Image: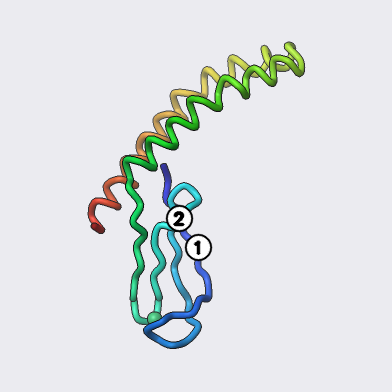
Amino acid sequence: MKFSELDAALYCSRCHDKTLHQVEYLNNKIYSIECTNCHHKIVSEMNPMRELYKEVYKRVTSKPTRLTKEYKEGSTHFLGQLPKRVLSKPYRLKNYVSETKNALKKMKAEK
Ligand SMILES: [Zn+2]
């Protein structure tokens, strides 16, 4: 679970004008939109635990299929890639856990 930000020119209902907005995404879904002029902020009613559950579920269910597909396409490539994957996994997982923790903390603070 991860937050990302993007600036976009959108119409603000308070400023009655097109202003620069800071858009925050959580897992590619809009989490909040804030007008950089009047700081009017709209936060979506996303349930963090539900988003996390959906993400973990997707990861768990998509993995075997991906590996199986590569295996079918050519076993040499599959085997060559395997050790690298196994090695990089703890690092990726550590990153993922800290990103998720930060995202949950942030959402809790804003509610
Ligand atoms: Zn505004």
Element on which disc 2 rests: strand
Count up the numbered dots. Answer: 2
Q: Position of residue 6 (x, y in %)?
A: 50, 62
Q: Tell me if label 2 and label 1 are in contact, CB under 8 Å.
A: yes
Tell me if the residue at label 2 has its CB under 8 Å from ligand 1: no
| Residue behind mark 2 | 25
Mark 2, other Cα within 10 Å: few <14 / some 14–19 / many ≥20: some
Q: Quadrant of the N terminus?
A: top left
Which quadrant of the rendered structure holds the C terminus?
bottom left
In this view, the residue in front, 5 or 60, is 60
- Which residue occupies the foreground of this view, 59 or 92? 59
Percent across and percent down for residue 2 are 42, 46
**Res. 99 visible in picture:** no
Identify the residue at image location x=29%, y=52%: 107
The residue shown at (53%, 17%) is 86
Identify which residue is drawn at 40% across, 86% down. 15
Q: Position of residue 60 (x, y in %)?
A: 48, 25
Mark 2 belongs to which amino acid? Answer: Tyr
- Horizontal and vertical percent position of residue 38: 35, 81
